[in-house]
């Protein structure tokens, strides 16, 4: 059984836009892999059509069966993490093994002051 991990340098999960995110990824693989890729992406969760987009990737070619590698990413300006009654936008890091597509995910928050934006009720206009 493969073991994958994502460890952040700072013991937190909330970040500001344009902040540098550093850490290490590690794996212990049962079968050879062609690459391991770290993806920073966002996705929506809630009612309606779900959406997703990859913002950054770090590719580790020719991975050894047991290995740890460091990474550094500058977080994007937007979109911000938010939650509302109908939909939420969540940021995450995924470590993906190629070609098996085995994955581990770690959710993070990206917003001003490192706080999720809470969408409230919109007042009705006349």
Image (cartoon, helix red, strand yellow):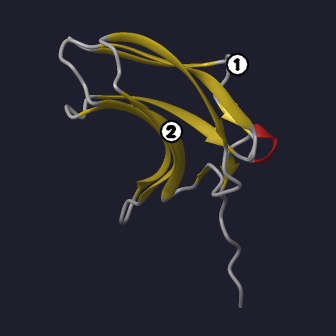
Return the residue nearer the eye: 124 or 34: 34
Residue drawn at x 69%, y 50% as measured from the top left? 117
Return the residue nearer the eye: 93 or 37: 37
Q: Does residue 110 appear to the left or right of 51 in the view shown?
A: right
Q: Quadrant of the N terminus?
A: top left
Circle 1 sits on which residue?
Answer: 10
Which quadrant holds residue 116? top right
Q: Quadrant of the C terminus?
A: bottom right
Question: Is residue 89 positioned above or below 37 on the image?
Answer: below
The location of residue 34, given as percent across then percent down, is 26, 30
Which quadrant holds residue 95? top left
Q: Secondary structure at mark 2?
A: strand
Residue drawn at x 58%, y 35% as measured from the top left? 108
Q: Does residue 96 appear in this view?
A: no
Return the residue nearer the eye: 57 or 117: 57
Question: Is residue 126 positioned above or below 51 on the image?
Answer: below
Residue drawn at x 71%, y 85% as measured from the top left? 125
Which of the labelled discs sits on residue 51, or is there none?
A: none
Circle 2 sits on which residue?
Answer: 92
In primary-sequence order, the first of circles 2 and 1 is 1
Q: Residues within 10 Å of mark 2 (few under 14, many from 20)?
A: some
Q: Secondary structure at mark 1?
A: loop
Q: Does residue 11 appear in this view?
A: yes
Q: Residue lying at the far right in this picture: please name it.
A: 113
Return the residue nearer the eye: 12 or 39: 39
Residue drawn at x 43%, y 17% as measured from the top left? 5
Q: Does residue 28 appear to the left or right of 42 in the view shown?
A: left
The location of residue 122, given as percent across then percent down, is 67, 70
Q: Residues within 10 Å of mark 1 (few under 14, many from 20)?
A: few
């Amino acid at each position: 059984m493969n073991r994958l991990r994502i460890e952040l340098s700072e013991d937190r999960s909330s970040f500001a836009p344009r902040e540098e995110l550093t850490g290490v990824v590690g794996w212990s693989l049962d079968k050879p892999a062609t690459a391991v890729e770290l993806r920073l992406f966002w996705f929506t969760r809630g009612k309606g059509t779900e959406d997703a987009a990859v913002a950054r990737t770090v590719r580790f070619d020719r991975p050894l069966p047991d290995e740890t590698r460091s990474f550094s990413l500058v977080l994007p300006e937007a979109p911000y993490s938010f939650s509302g009654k109908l939909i939420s936008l969540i940021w995450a890091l995924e470590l993906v093994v190629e070609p098996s597509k085995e994955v581990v995910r770690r959710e993070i928050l990206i917003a001003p002051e490192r706080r999720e934006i809470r969408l409230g009720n919109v007042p009705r206009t006349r």
